[in-house]
Image: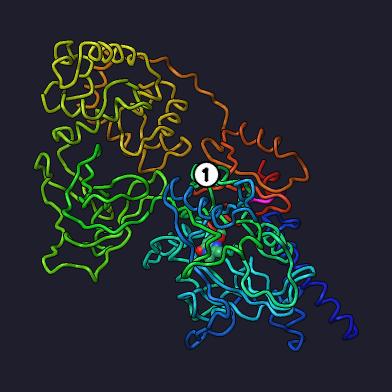
Amino acid sequence: MLAPTEIIQNVKTLRNELERHNYRYYVMDDPTVPDVEYDRLMNRLKDIEAKYPLLIVPESPTQRVGGAPLAGFTQVTHEMPMLSLDNAFSEDDMQDFNRRIIGRLGNIGAEDGVVEYVCEPKLDGIAVSLLYEKGQLVRGATRGDGETGEDITQNVRTVNSIPLKLMGSGYPERLEVRGEIYMPKSSFDALNQEAERTDNKLFVNPRNAAAGSLRQLDPKITAGRNLEMCCYSVGIVEGGAFSDTHSDSLYCLNQWGFRINAEMKVVADVDGCLSYYQSISEKRNLLPYEIDGVVFKVNNLALQQRLGFVSRAPRWAIAHKFPAQEELTTVLDVEFQVGRTGAVTPVARLVPVFVGGVTVSNATLHNMDEIERLGLMIGDSVIIRRAGDVIPKVVKVVEEKRPDNACSVTFPALCPVCESEVIQLEGEAVARCSGGLFCAAQRKEAIKHFASRKAMDIDGLGDKLVESLVDEDYIKSVADLYKLTRFQVASMDRMAEKSANNLLGALERSKNTKLSSFVYALGIREVGETTARTLSNAFGTLEKIRTANVETLLAVQDVGPIVANHIVSFFEQSHNNEIIEQLIAVGVHWPDVVVDETDKVFQGKTFVITGTLSQMSREEAKEKLLELGAKVSGSVSKKTYCLIAGEAAGSKLKKAEDLGINIMNEQAFIDLL
Ligand code: I6G
């Protein structure tokens, strides 16, 4: 039986230890103990608190899970208004901003015509204020309109990267920390996947998901949403000033337990700001969170004070925004496109809109289920999103803006290209034209695919040229490509003699190919580049693939019943075999593949290794996996088959858990080997 003082001491030690691990994990992204150890400590603390409830305090790490639901949010008046930032949209705007600052500071502060700036990415989240008194978190509030926000203390307490109690020492008596609460891209994807699985409404983007999660009256829901917070400034500072520069104040915040942006950088002048903008633009898609620009601030706090504010924005800071990734536009029409496999896909024709750096006039709507899910009608105002290189997507219909003459979308019963019947099989979301290669659209797409780089790699045979050659009736099948005459090619629009010769040369060169490229080029449904390679490695010759039955195909790694059936039915159709014979007859050839008979149990499966392994090095583990046919990648994604997690596994383990990927500890891996 422990004495009360010993119990209290144990509780203190456990809390300190847990807070330290929390900090290493959520703030520094650098855990020092494995998750199981963290769980053990947490369970020990929970057990003691359950036995002695009087010892429970709000800052205990056990209290992050969220208390009882609220009836509503109360209003908070910000003692110091939460300002907004002016925006720059171009290099000229940035130069103007810098000139204004130098001009105002003149000979005191910008003597040599330069000012030092701090650069940070501008996270696309929700601005919040956290108030600490004597080191304890006493209130969390949204920015609201800058004067008045909402009290979200219960919810911010569930965010693991927000300290409930400040660490270390030297912090002011009253300290208000400001920053952005956001949802990492991986958590957003996992949340929407789950919403899709459970037939719930999807969130439009990580920002809306973060806002929705923070506006929950039940903090337990917020606790399950994997939000993070990154700090960017302070508001109230009473009872202890702590730095002369903005960068220094961020370092202090970091020491006291807050996450600051790892990309933060101090630059000597405006040219440094412009290079920073460029480099962050380039790595934007690789960052684990969404950003909509970068923020520059004069580093010296005394100079910030001298510059002051204009209306509701500081003169010493600016947000250099990226081109918007979401825009509002109108659906002019919905048309139906026919793809290589006959899939009939609705496409929204839009009033052209500049989004994510390009002008977008079309967006795929995937299938009728998607149109129903969005509740989309022709004439609707919609939000279009184009992030990175991703195909533009309609993410939301703005129903309030629906015009009276909006009309619903009807799926065509006949193919819009060849008028064959459109068929939707039971359980499939996609409807298909039944015309096969009779359908000019399917023919065009099949030929484009055949000519593409990863297939037969026919240089100079672009999409437009394929369409014209089919429209002219010069080619009906891929085999006809090799029968094209110089006269036919040269007669095509914008085909000079030289390009015609080049194309004929490329066609000739393409005849010398690889089995995997040829199998991929055939365009068998669900047989992508990787499956084509797996098939050629497993069978070695086209003849063996052609004559394989479903059972034999199922024995190949990664080939499931759907793919196996598509392969068998492709080779059952006589016209496909005729085309293959014609291709071979005109000289298309490839060497057979030597089949490696060893049993490669992990053929094609992607593994990730993380954390420290104690019985072998990571390199040795990788070698073993490669020997068994696996691929080993450095990052976890939906494509990962299994994560091998050693000691002190960190963010990769968390991501794998979020994505529901197989996780194996070192011992299980060794047992498996
Ligand atoms: O909205 C903001 C995003 C990022 C900010 C901000 C910021 O710094 C990285 N900084 C300030 C001072 C304000 N808004 C007002």
Q: Residue furthest left?
A: 419
* Above-or-below relation of 504 to 671: above
- Residue 673 in sight from this viewpoint: yes
Report the front residue among 391 and 307.
307
Q: Which corner quadrant of the image does residue 496 belong to?
A: top left
- Residue 652 in sight from this viewpoint: no
Report the front residue among 182 and 439.
182
Here the colouring is rainbow
**Quadrant showing the N terminus:** bottom right
Q: Residue at x 16, y 24 (%)?
A: 469
Residue 338 picture location, percent across and down: 20, 42
Residue 580 picture location, percent across and down: 26, 21
Q: Residue at x 34, y 22 (%)?
A: 456
* Above-or-below relation of 381 to 558: below
Residue 71 on the magenta segment: no
Q: What SS does tag 1 mark?
A: helix
Count up the numbered dots: 1
Three-letter residue code for mark 1: Leu
Query: What stretch of residues is rendered in magenta?
Result: 663-667
Q: Which residue is mark 1?
A: 274
**Quadrant showing the C terminus:** top right
531 with respect to 31 (left or right): left
Q: Quadrant of ligand 1?
A: bottom right
Q: Which corner quadrant of the image does residue 505 belong to?
A: top left
134 with respect to 111 (left or right): right
Q: Residue at x 46, y 28 (%)?
A: 538
Residue 574 picture location, percent across and down: 21, 27
* Above-or-below relation of 259 to 130: above
Report the front residue among 66 and 626.
66
* Above-or-below relation of 584 to 401: above
Q: Residues within 10 Å of mark 1 (few under 14, many from 20)?
A: some
